[in-house]
Image (cartoon, rainbow, N blue to C red):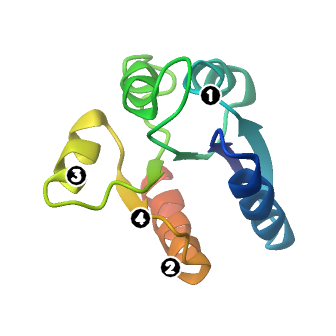
Amino acid sequence: MAKILLVDDNEENWEMLSRRLTRRGYVVVVARDGQQAVDMASSEAPDLILMDMNMPVIDGWEATRRIRATPELASIPIIAVTAHGMAGDREKILEAGCWDHHIKPVELTRLLAQIETMLKKGQGG
């Protein structure tokens, strides 16, 4: 099954989401800040990244830009999972390099559908 890099600095968020994704057969690895996300994108070779945009060290915006700037990582689908839901936020998220976004609180059914869609796109489908 696909490996997902879950990037979130809130322990409650990543524990809940990690459990739910693991139960559905995904392999989940967790980064707790943006720099860890960039490092783990290289070392873990995930099939997809769920990126919180507000984090310590470097934020999700910058982490996404750095991942996109690395040729061997540039095609990994990234879904922003964020509280940014105001007008214009979606466009900013897509400009930063995310392929889609999901506004918190997480709606698991919708997020799972987004993950499946992005995994297919990432495989060229």
Estimate how packed mark 4 is, as few (under 14), some (14 to 19) or many (20 or more) residues with alpha carbons within 10 Å.
some
Image location (x, y in percent) of residue 76: 50, 39
Say whether residue 107 is left or right of residue 16. Answer: left
Q: Image quadrant of residue 35? A: top right
Seen in the picture, residue 111 relative to 90 is either above or below; the reply is: below
Q: Which residue is mark 2?
A: 110
Q: Which circle's residue, 3 or 4, is located before the other in the chain?
A: 3
Residue at horizontal 74 percent and vertical 30 percent from the top: 44
Q: CA distance from mark 3 to mark 4?
A: 10 Å
SS category of the residue bearing label 1: loop
Q: Counting residues from the N terminus, which is met first, the one under dot 4 or under dot 1? A: 1
In the picture of the structure, the residue carrying the numbered disc 4 is 103
Q: Earlier in the sequence, mark 1 or mark 3?
A: 1
- Residue type indicated by callout 2: Arg
The three-letter code of the residue at mark 4 reads: Ile
**Considering the numbered disc 2 on the image, is that residue within a helix, a strand or a loop?**
helix
Q: Return the mark for residue 81.
A: none
Q: Which residue is mark 1?
A: 33
Distance between mark 1 and mark 2 Cα atoms:
24 Å
Cα–Cα span, label 2 and label 4: 10 Å
